[in-house]
Amino acid sequence: MTDLQLQQLEKAQLDAVLKLDAICFESEPFAAVWWQKALTSAGASSWILSWKDRPVAYCLFSEIMDEAELLRIAVDPQQRGKGLATDLLHKVQDALIERGITRFFLEVRASNRAAQALYHRCGWQPCGRRKNYYPLGDALEDALLFSREP
């Protein structure tokens, strides 16, 4: 896939990102109010990877001082397996490092092996576990904590 463009999310792209989020996280999409905050709140950093002016991947970080937490990352299901998430995460990490970020954090479901592989490829390391953190039907699932330092 050529002609990919990385940019920070703008209001004009919000509807397309909301639709993509609903497709990627059908059981738990972010509420529109959270995406509105991503556009307007200090400390929110949302990025999209577009192809032909259509978002195909996005990520959302929360920044506090010199630290950033990855809150969400997704790729259009029709575009998966092309390295877009790896490319997006590397580029956004580089941009955040240029803005002064010195440490990254995230949490991921213990069962989400694909996401964990992505984070390893992008230099993240496991650093902890939150027991019974995510709902999983009638049960609970652990969250694995990852961090990365440039």
Image: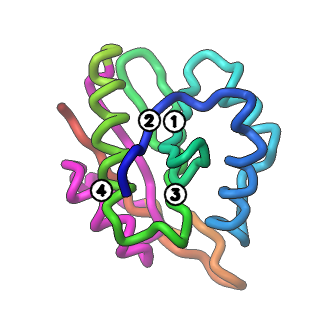
Which x, y percent locates residue 80?
43, 69
Q: From the top left corner, tell me how far across and down residue 112 is, in percent.
A: 43, 73
Image location (x, y in percent) of residue 77 = 54, 71
Secondary structure under badge 3?
strand
Which label sits in the foreground, 2 or 1?
2
Residue positioned 55% across, 63% down in the render: 76
Q: CA distance from mark 4 to mark 1?
A: 17 Å
What label sits on residue 138 in the rendered view?
A: none
Instruction: Decide which of tag 4 and tag 2 comes sooner along the chain.
Output: 2
User: What residue would you read off at disc 2?
Assistant: 6
Q: Residue 12 versus residue 113: which sits nearer the camera?
A: 12
Closer to the N terminus: mark 3 or mark 2? 2
- Which of discs 3 and 2 lies nearer the camera? The answer is 2
Outermost residue to the bottom: 138
Q: Given contact means CB atoms under 8 Å apart, are the residues at marks 2 and 1 in contact?
A: yes
Q: Earlier in the sequence, mark 4 or mark 1?
A: 1
Q: Amino acid at mark 4?
A: Tyr
The residue indicated by pointer 1 is 47
What kind of residue is marked 2? Answer: Leu
What amino acid type should be assigned to the residue bearing mark 3?
Ala
| Residue that numbered label 3 is attached to | 74
Mark 4 against mark 1, which lies toward the viewer?
1
**In magenta segment, residue 103:** yes
Checking the image for residue 119, the label placed there is 4
- The residue segment tinted magenta is 101-129
